[in-house]
Image (cartoon, grey):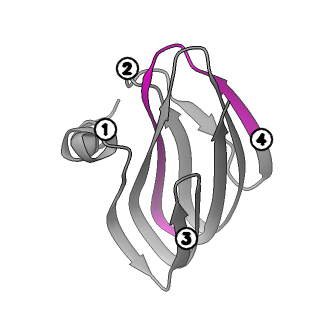
Amino acid sequence: MNKIGVAINSLFGNIISMGMSSSIGIEIGSIGINTPHHIRYSYIYFSGTKIRGIRAGEGKTISFNFTSKVKKGELRMQIMNPDQVSPIQLAVGITGTSDIKTQNIGIYKLVISGTNTEGGFDISWVVK
């Protein structure tokens, strides 16, 4: 994990562990929704990180539906397991699905990071 990831994890670890969401960075011209199983934003400018905590038990499956569009800049979407290792990347610029089989009980983190980006993303999930 890079230094930014460690800092974000330290700063927002307690908030995420309660199943909440957090956001740090700069957004201009953004509109979106942030509900318990869905996050969607479109923006003229986004540079920062949004984090969502997803509580799941051992042996469960977290199913993600996602789409994103990047007109410029860089967007990263990844899922971190409770141990903060081996992030799973969600592809950017496409519509897709991804199923993650949980190995541990805990809070899985959906981390969306933008660097000087314009566009949007839409991610929903269900724990089965």
Q: In which quarter of the image is residue 98?
A: top right
Q: In which quarter of the image is the N terminus?
A: top left
Q: What residue type is labelled 1?
A: Ser
Task: Give the Cα distance between marks 1 and 3.
Answer: 21 Å
* Residue identified by numbered label 4: 97
Numbered tag placed on residue 33 in the rendering: 3
Q: Which amino acid does label 4 sit on?
A: Thr
Does the residue at mark 1 contact the one at mark 3 (Cβ under 8 Å)? no
Q: Is mark 4 on a helix, strand or loop?
A: strand
Q: Earlier in the sequence, mark 4 or mark 1?
A: 1
For the view shown, which residue lies furthest in the bottom direction?
29
Q: What element carries label 1?
A: helix
Residue 97 in the image: x percent, y percent?
Answer: 77, 41
Does the residue at mark 4 contact the one at mark 2 (Cβ under 8 Å)? no
* Residue identified by numbered label 1: 17
Q: Nearer the viewer, mark 3 or mark 2?
A: 3
Q: What residue type is labelled 3?
A: Ile
Q: Which of marks 4 and 1 is in front?
A: 1
